[in-house]
Image: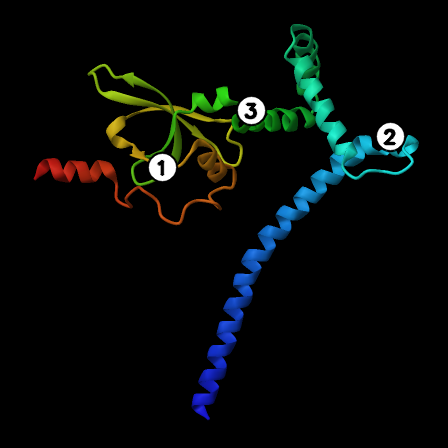
Amino acid sequence: MTLKKKTHGKKKISLKNDFLSGLLVVIPLGITLFALQFLFLFFDNITGQYFREFLPFYIPGIGLLFSIIVILLIGIFVNHWLGKKLFHSLERRIVKLPLLGSVYTVTRQILEIFGSSRKRREFQKVIFLQYPKEGIWTIGFVTGHSLSANNTQLYNVFVPTTPNPTSGYMIFIPIEDAVESPLTIEEGMRIVISGGIVAPPRMPFPAEKIGILQHEESSK
């Protein structure tokens, strides 16, 4: 009887684990499909409603295709000197709007980081460093190299804030105090924006303070 209870209990645990594993697969896929469906319907309906008025039958996706063409034409116009001038004038007015101006600014800056190749080149690589003090680790983006007054090689590092990576701190650290990371710029940004939710399960930095370790090694 006891053996049967144990076997029954193990089966329950196994079924529970299988169900949770299924949820981990289904929920992200479901959210992704829902987001794709939402974006498709959103852009398809923006201009698709006008096609419905004169087409004998509606073709799903024609509104989306037309929206893509319109966005492309807007991009071509904005890259022209007249378009740039008009857009900057409009942008200055939008930024001054309460609340909406802040939302617009943050959204634009985040899209620039992920969408602009020029912006991505400004961030050379992802590193981990002890900031704001030893023993506390954070993620940083190398923007350049410098020399200190005593000729120590330095990293110029941008340390972003979470969840808004468009603000942060500019610091200079010795290269040997940084821990190199295999993460891409996009992966590093995703970690920052998610507040660490999508961080890798194993970090490349030690739990100990680098400064203390270096001092102990030099004193031996």
Residue visible at 85% across and 38% down in the picture: 58
Residue found farthest to the top: 81
Label 3: which residue? 112
Q: Which of the labelled discs sits on residue 50, or is there none?
A: 2
Q: Is residue 53 above or below residue 207?
A: above
- Looking at the rendered image, the disc whose residue lies closer to the viewer, 2 or 3, is 2
Question: Horizontally, is 166 left or right of 54 in the view?
Answer: left
- Looking at the rendered image, the disc whose residue lies closer to the viewer, 2 or 1, is 2
Pinpoint residue 188: horizontal percent, then vertical percent. 44, 35
Question: Horizontally, is 129 left or right of 188 in the view?
Answer: left
Identity, as a three-letter code, of the amino acid under mark 1: Pro
Among the 4 quarters of the image, the one containing residue 143:
top left
Pinpoint residue 118: horizontal percent, then vertical percent. 49, 19
Which one is nearer the viewer's eye here, 48 or 122? 48
Pinpoint residue 65: horizontal percent, then vertical percent. 74, 30
Among the 4 quarters of the image, the one containing residue 106:
top right
Identity, as a three-letter code, of the amino acid under mark 3: Glu
Can you see residue 96?
no
Which one is nearer the viewer's eye here, 198 or 97? 198
Q: Earlier in the sequence, mark 2 or mark 1?
A: 2
Q: Residues under labels 2 and 1: Cα distance?
A: 49 Å
Q: Is residue 148 above or below residue 81?
A: below
Q: Residues under labels 2 and 3: Cα distance?
A: 31 Å
Q: Quick one: label 1, few (<14), some, or many (20+) residues within 10 Å?
A: few
Identity, as a three-letter code, of the amino acid under mark 2: Tyr
Label 1: which residue? 182
Q: Secondary structure at mark 2?
A: helix
Q: Secondary structure at mark 1?
A: loop
